[in-house]
Image (spheres, helix red, strand yellow):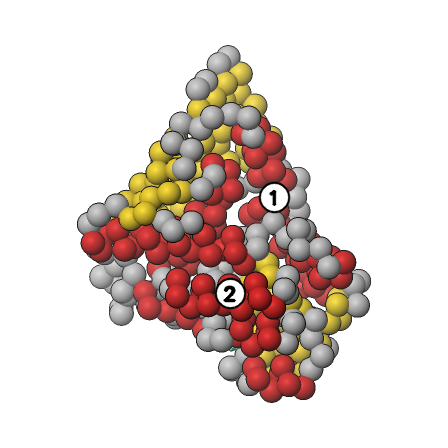
Amino acid sequence: MVKVAIVGAGGIAQTHLKVLAENEDVRMVAVCDVVKESAEKAALAYGMKSYTDFDSMLDREQIDALFVCVPPFGHEDIEEKAAAKNIHLLVEKPIGLDMASARRKAEAIKSSGIIAASGYCLRYIDVVEQARHYLADKPIGMVSAHYLSGFVNTPWWRDLAKSGGQLIEQATHTVDLVRYLAGEIRSVYGLMGYGLLEDKAGATIPSVVTVGLDFVSGAVGHIDTACIQPDWRNAVEVMGKDYRLTLSGKSLTITEPNRTTTLEGKTQNMYKEQDDAFIEAVRTHNPALPRSSYANALHTLEVSLAAYESARDERRVKLHF
Ligand SMILES: NC(=O)c1ccc[n+]([C@@H]2O[C@H](COP(=O)([O-])OP(=O)(O)OC[C@H]3O[C@@H](n4cnc5c(N)ncnc54)[C@H](O)[C@@H]3O)[C@@H](O)[C@H]2O)c1
């Protein structure tokens, strides 16, 4: 049995707890949240011990794997402490808000030898794999992606210093998917706007961001985000000579001369696929099973942070990877 603990008992933790409870190889041992009632509620529902102090949980419990489900600003040195105790990690996206601390964590993880996955769950949808398979031998000319939605009312979300804004907190899934499908990005050019959020008291995040992408392959592209929309739209379109591939939700459409093919995904629960892969990786000591490692998440974070730097300094920013 893999003994699992969770830190941060909010929205996404509930999703993990539900699927972990269905996994016969898992024993849920403990949960920690700085809000006592949140920890106690989750502990009661899933038969775990509850903590408000992370160090106490690590000291007192035998833990094989830890799910890190704190908000972007709350990572402190959770990952370093877990790695020092050889506890394997699944860290929710985004893994942080600055490269220096994320790199420090990545180093601690690497030198400990633990398995560290990150929560880029879209990678576990079957049509995403089918898209990768289709693109495997095709040169890409351009990528056009968007994550357009309404405002999120979670209290910390509107604060740029706490969430990183929509590009880092939500559209990070799109950034990661673009990298997964079209390969590494070597430089970015970001533009952002702050208007149209006057009714959101205290909001410091940009309302709209567009990021120009320059891929190592020579392809170009862009990702657009907006949190001022009445509905939710999210898609990645990849274009090459005589083809266009469009991934939107669980649907994949491939357009070729005289032929359009649409595939509807069959993946029921991407979180279950992701968490089962991670638990199996821990159980069998196979770090190849998770489709997004912590190191991968570091690349995705760098793209978004570089876009902000570019927008601020009004210049193209090269990536370090
Ligand atoms: N993979 C996905 O699809 C997905 C979906 C939703 C959220 N997320 C990510 O999960 C993370 C959490 O989001 P959420 O929606 O669950 O937020 P939330 O605000 O609902 O929950 C966060 C919880 O963490 C607790 N917390 C904060 N700092 C803590 C600390 N230092 N130690 C212990 N507990 C702490 C809070 O009290 C709260 O209960 C975010 O990074 C978010 O982007 C991922």
- Vertical side of 33 occupied by 66: above or below: above
Instruction: Pinpoint residue 21: horizontal percent, then vertical percent.
Output: 72, 65
- Vertical side of 303 occupied by 102: above or below: below
Question: Which residue appears at 47% of the width and 36% of the height?
Answer: 182
- Number of the label disc, if any, that sits on residue 177: none
Camera-side residue of 61 and 267: 61
Tell me if 1 is positioned left or right of 198 in this view: right
Ranked by sequence position, the earlier of labels 2 and 1 is: 2
| Picture quadrant where residue 271 is located | bottom right
Question: Label 1: how many residues lie within 10 Å, few (<14), some (14-19) or many (20+)?
Answer: many
Question: Which residue appears at 64% of the width and 53% of the height?
Answer: 290
| Picture quadrant where residue 32 is located | bottom right
Q: SS for tag 1?
A: loop
Residue placed under numbered mark 1 in the picture: 125
Instruction: Pinpoint residue 149: horizontal percent, then vertical percent.
Output: 39, 50
Residue placed under numbered mark 2 in the picture: 107
Instruction: Pinpoint residue 137: horizontal percent, then vertical percent.
Output: 55, 26
- Vertical side of 271 occupied by 125: above or below: above
Q: SS for tag 2?
A: helix
Count of numbered marks: 2
Question: Which residue appears at 71% of the width and 55% of the height?
Answer: 286
Mark 2: which amino acid?
Glu
Camera-side residue of 225 and 140: 140
Instruction: Say which quadrant the N terminus sits in.
Output: bottom right
Q: CA distance from mark 2 to mark 1?
A: 29 Å
Residue 30 seen from this side: yes
- Vertical side of 231 occupied by 20: above or below: below
